[in-house]
Amino acid sequence: MADATGNQDSKDYGLGIPQKTEGFFLKGCGNLEWGMKDRLSRIFNKKSGRTVMLAFDHGYIMGPTSGLERMDLTIVPLIEHADCIMCTRGALRQIVPASSNKPISLRASAGSTVLTDLNDECLLDIEECIRVNASMLALMVAIGSKYEALTIRNLTTMVDQGSRYGIPVLGVTAVGKELVRDARYLSLATRVCAENGAHIIKTYYCSPDFEKVVAACPVPIVIAGGKKLPELEALQMAFEAIDQGAAGVDMGRNVFQAEHPVAMIQAVKAVVHDNLKPKDAFALYNDLKNKKS
Ligand code: 5RP
C-alpha cells in the first residue's frame, strides 16, 4: 500500500530525454481516441499493418449458406487462425467459444434477406455491442441503391455511438446486382464511407485500378472474398489486393467453402502477412491440406 510517510524524494525525471509520442500504424487513424486505437491494434497486426478477418455473417441475410450449415463443426476450427472474426451476435453466442478471445467485428446492422429487398436495415443497440465485447461494429452501406440514404444515416449513427465508447466502425460497401464493381464505383462508395466517419472499409477487389481505390480512401481497406473461386485464384486476388495497398482481407466463402478450409486460411495469412506469392501460397495450401487428418 502506498505510504505517505518516509517517501523517497523523486529524482528520475529523465531530463534532456524527450518523451516519446507514438504515432499509429494505421492510415488515417492517428487522431483516434485511445480505446479505438487499442481495439484496432487487436484486429490489425502491428508488424504487417494488416489483418485476416474471417467472415461468417452470411446467414443473417442468406440463411444456411453452403459451408455454414453447422458452424460449430466448420467455423470453430478456423477461429484460432483468424486475426479477427466477423459474425452476428446470434452466431457469437451460439457457437463461438467465449474463451477464443478473438477480436470481434460484430455484424451490427440487420433488416432484410435475399428473399426481399436487401439493405433495408436498422442497427443493433450499442449496449448489446458492448455486452459482447465487440472490437468493431460492421454495417452495410448501400451507395447507389434505393437504401442509400437510410444506410448512410445508419453509418453516421453507428459512428456517433461507437465514438462514444471507443469502438471503431467497419463500413461494408454493399454493391447491388445492378451496379458495376469497378474502380469508379468502388472509389465513390469507399470514399463516402470514410468521409462519413467509417474507420475501416470493407469492399471488393477490382481490376484494373484497385490501387486508385485504395489511394483515394483515407482509411484502411480490407477486401471481401466474394463468391467461391478456385483456391489459386482466390490467393491471387488476395495477393493483388495486398500488393495494391489493401490492409487485409475479410474473407468468408473463399475460406470456409474451400476444399480444406484450415489449410486455406493459413495460406491466405501467408499472403497477407508475409507477402507470399500466389503460387507459393498455393503450394503451402497443398502442403498443409496433405498434412491434415
Ligand atoms: C455480406 C458480408 C460478408 O461478410 C462478406 O461478403 C464476406 O464474405 P465473402 O468473402 O464470402 O464475400 O459482409 O454479408
Image (cartoon, grey):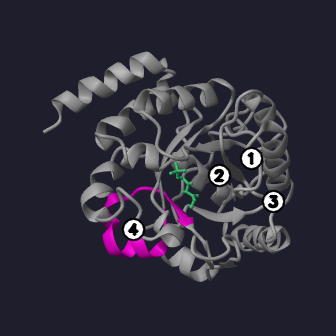
Please identify, in this view, whether the residue under mark 3 or under mark 1 is nearer the observer. Answer: 3
- The stretch in magenta equals 87-106
Please identify, in this view, whether the residue under mark 4 or under mark 2 is nearer the observer. Answer: 4
2 and 1 marks in contact (CB < 8 Å): yes
Relative horizontal placement of residue 197, taking residue 56 as reference (left or right): right
Residue 262 location (% of width, % of height): 30, 41
Mark 3 residue element = loop
Mark 1 residue element = loop
Residue 74 location (% of width, % of height): 28, 56
Q: How far apart are marks 4 and 2 (CA)?
A: 35 Å
Q: In this view, does 257 lie above or below 102?
A: above
The label shown at residue 217 is none
Task: Give the residue pinned by disc 4.
Answer: 64
Q: Does the magenta stretch include residue 102?
A: yes
Q: Distance between the residues labelled 3 and 1?
A: 23 Å
Task: Give the residue pinned by disc 2.
Answer: 37
Task: Give the residue pinned by disc 3.
Answer: 143
Please identify, in this view, whether the residue under mark 4 or under mark 3 is nearer the observer. Answer: 4
Task: Tell me which label, 3 or 1, sits earlier in the chain.
Answer: 1
